[in-house]
Image (cartoon, rainbow, N blue to C red):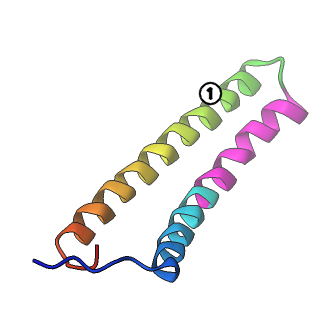
Amino acid sequence: MARAEITVPEMLSESVEIVQLLAIWSVIAVVPLAYYAFVDSDSVVGLGSRYVGSFLLVVGGANVLLYVIARGISLAQTDRV
């Protein structure tokens, strides 16, 4: 099976999808973290929002990692890379 070279526009299109996925999860996680940082950092609700924001960042990172692995597998099955 001959392997074709990947071009810069193909790499950029792949990286834009990853950046969009990271941005979506970051925006979702900013809401509880901003609540903790600027509104209520001393109560139980503020502490809970910090943990929720951190959990969302971890889940988002895992989601991006799974996307990268799945995309790599799908590209490996073609002769694009």
Which residue range is magenta in the image? Answer: 24-40
- Who is closer to the viewer here, 66 or 31? 66
79 relative position to 52: left or right: left
Q: Residue at x 21, y 76 (%)?
A: 3
Q: Based on the picture, tell me whether residue 13 belongs to the magenta stretch.
A: no
- Taking 68 as reference, is 4 left or right? left
Q: Looking at the image, which is closer to me, 56 or 61?
A: 61
CA neighbours of label 1 inside 10 A, class few (<14), some (14 to 19), many (20+): some
Residue 23's spot in the image, x, y percent?
Answer: 64, 59
Q: Quadrant of the N terminus?
A: bottom left
Q: Give the residue at x 45% y 80%.
A: 7
Query: Residue 75's quadrant in the figure?
Result: bottom left
Which residue position holds label 1? 51
Q: Residue at x 61, y 33 (%)?
A: 54
Task: Point out residue 38 in the picture as x, y percentages from the top left corner.
Answer: 90, 35
60 w.r.t. 78: above or below: above
- The vertical placement of 8 against 66, above or below, is below
